[in-house]
Amino acid sequence: MGIEQKAGNMGVVTLKLEEVINWSRTNAMWPMLFGLACCAIEMMSAQASNFDMSRFGMELMRPSPRQSDLMIVAGRVSRKMGPVLRWLYDQMPEPKWVIAMGDCASCGGVFNNYAIVQGVDEVVPVDVYVAGCPPRPEALIHGIVTLYEKVKEEKMKDWA
Amino acid sequence: MDIDLETNLPPDALDGMQHLVSDRAVRGETVLLNMGPQHPSTHGVLRLLLELDGEVVVNCVPDIGFLHTGIEKNMEAKTYLKAEVMTDRLDYLNNLGNNLTYVMAIEKLADLDVPPRAQAIRVLLTELQRIASHLVWLGTHALDAAAMSVFLYCFRERERILDIFEMVSGQRMMTTYFRPGGLWRDVTSGFEAAVRDFVSYFPPRVTEYDRLLTKNPIFLRRTKEIGYLEPEVALRHGVTGPMLRAAGIEFDLRKAQPYSGYELYDFDVPTHTDSDTYARYLMRMEEMRQSIRIVEQALNKLPLGPVRSNNRKYVPPPRSELGTSMEAVIHHFKLWTEGFIPPKGSVYVATESPRGELGVFLESDGGPKPYRVHWRTPSFTNIQILPILARGHLVADLVLLIGTVDILLGDVDR
Amino acid sequence: MMNEELHTIAAELKERFAADLYEFRGEVSLILKPEDIVAFSRALRDEYDFELLTEETAVDYWPEQTPRFHVVYRWRSLKRNTIIGARVLLDGNSPSMPSIVKVYLNANGFERELWDMFGICFEEHPDLRRIMMPADWVGHPLRKDYPLGYEEVQFTFNFDEIDQRKPYAKE
């Protein structure tokens, strides 16, 4: 009762295992529902009707870090929030990725002061930086697609 | 960790917080639960320490500061004009309202005049911003009550407002469009048509949300008689905005102390007497309708003329003058290198933000940088009412109570 | 705004608390002694219908020491539709003054913020903890002698140099 009845006999597809794994990872990447500041509103816009991030296999935002693959750090991270952020990151199961959304998360942005962590890469390792203050939803989606490119390049021998 | 051998407890076990929770927590009869700072319905990074008796909230202690940005300190280190960029990021759903408050404070400090066209455009855009802010509130509030579709509808309409902002300023959210003495520049040619389009498009949409929520039995059960707030308590806690008006006290700065030409427009300030979550929902829905009324009036009588003051000590000269006038070049150079220098003194200016009274205290020491900026933000005061609202309610209602106070953590923590 | 009414009130209060009065751009403020503030705010609330404490903040005039801090208050009356302000002058050496939490409950948050940001101690405040900064933070950030905490910005010419000493997080 699945695709094989609709599409006929699919036969056999031969493929490299790492390609299948990477393909499946990119098409069902669940981001963590975690907004910090202004960028969180744009992240919500990206989820909502006009931009509809579920086209990229992301309709499910998981509130729990233990069910998510991708952390979108949407907004400025204060010194008080930094340890919490790291704690959340540590709870995420492998494999996991991080997108630093916006200037504040990438490098501190306009807030070069005592309260803000100057770039979230001091707290968690970042895979993709998205520029903008805040980035448009399209920019976030572009960042996610860029992350997919990165994930598709991953090699099995590096996982072990 | 050092363990006290007599009591078998680590030295800082609950002692630092004993005054925040009841004695029953110390005896172990109630449960202490941490909610946030990463929680889907705390609307940002709010942390609540809950003391629960079963599922009933006995005590609720908000812990804020997870988004503390140091905006006030950072504004002291920039010139007046550069510091305006920070104001956008304060209450990030009311960016233009923050700009308006800040530039009005500078105008009051420097005794600057603002042309009527600029005033009208300011009112128009601020009201659109109010609608956009209420739309985000409505979407997330409905989402907290498990109504997903309202969220999608609300963001559809919000995009249209953001498109208008992008049209005039080039940015969707952080516009910095209002400048001391007027606007950054005049609106673009398609602006009036776009706003007119929105004015005819939006009212039927509010009716649509009405149909989805107002008589929805699940929504009614979740919101009616939840979070009752006595008017006296609200006043004593300094609550302003829709929270206060839903308690039956008609206080709206747009009516009470009109600024930026609000006295020219005909609108009502909705009030309610029930003072529960449902009443606040009705209030904000009505506010959106009133805002669209103001937008329509402002659009119909949009005056022509300049959008910037002619005071060259504060407002940069237009580009066309730079090629012909030496004086204009000097002013331009002074403004963009040193910045303007308002007289010594301190002012307080307040506007009505979607969340309540948004005020800025600005002190000048006669230099090009503000000596002290303090933001009196509505959310910071309103969040202190949360423990009173939450007492005696179920944990499940708490998410709606956070929604009904309409806090924004950028506004709370600054 | 009914300016005459406000001026009458301000004159009465000036007389009663032996305060200084000053006005700038139509805003009336009184300069009070720290020990008067509770009685003053009680009088405002009960006798002059100032229902709301609008804001309470401070200004630091470092390096001046006596007085170093001005604690700025502002009350709003809905009934009279007006605002009145007050300032309390404090010395730089362990500044301390009475709390008005018992009169206006929302002073709680403001005073906690003042303690956190300026290190001004409020006597008889029920819960004087840090509110914005982490509990183990050292210093009071909004004081003028506290540095802004500027970090050098990476540009093309110094990118590699800063990149080497930047504390990147590990997996």
Image (cartoon, rainbow, N blue to C red):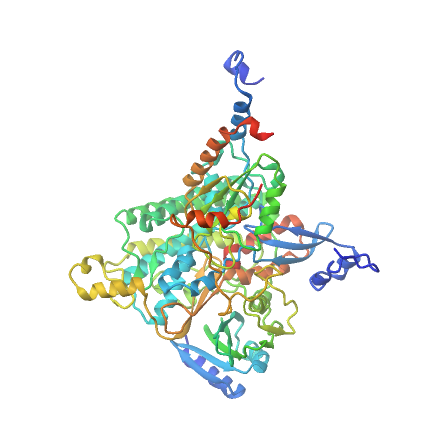
Image quarter where the N terminus of chain B lies is bottom right
Observer able to see residue B251: yes
Observer able to see residue B262: no
Looking at the picture, does residue C36 appear above or below residue C82? below
Toward the viewer: B125 or A64? A64
Q: How many marks?
A: 0
Looking at the picture, does residue C61 appear above or below residue A7? below
Q: How far from the left and from the top, in percent, is residue B261?
A: 34, 64
Q: How far from the left and from the top, in percent, is residue C24?
A: 39, 77
Q: How far from the left and from the top, in percent, is residue B102?
A: 40, 63
Image quarter of residue B113: bottom left
Q: Residue furthest right?
A: B6
On the picture, is B334 further left or further right than C78?
A: left
Toward the viewer: B172 or B126? B172
Q: Residue furthest left?
A: B324
Q: Tell me what residue is drawn at x 47 percent, y 75 percent.
A: C61
Q: Tell me what residue is drawn at x 55 percent, y 21 percent.
A: A17
Q: How far from the left and from the top, in percent, is residue A43?
A: 48, 43
Toward the viewer: A154 or A34? A154
Looking at the picture, does residue A69 appear above or below residue B374? above
Looking at the picture, does residue A158 appear above or below residue B364? above
Toward the viewer: B57 or B35? B35
Image quarter of residue B204: top left
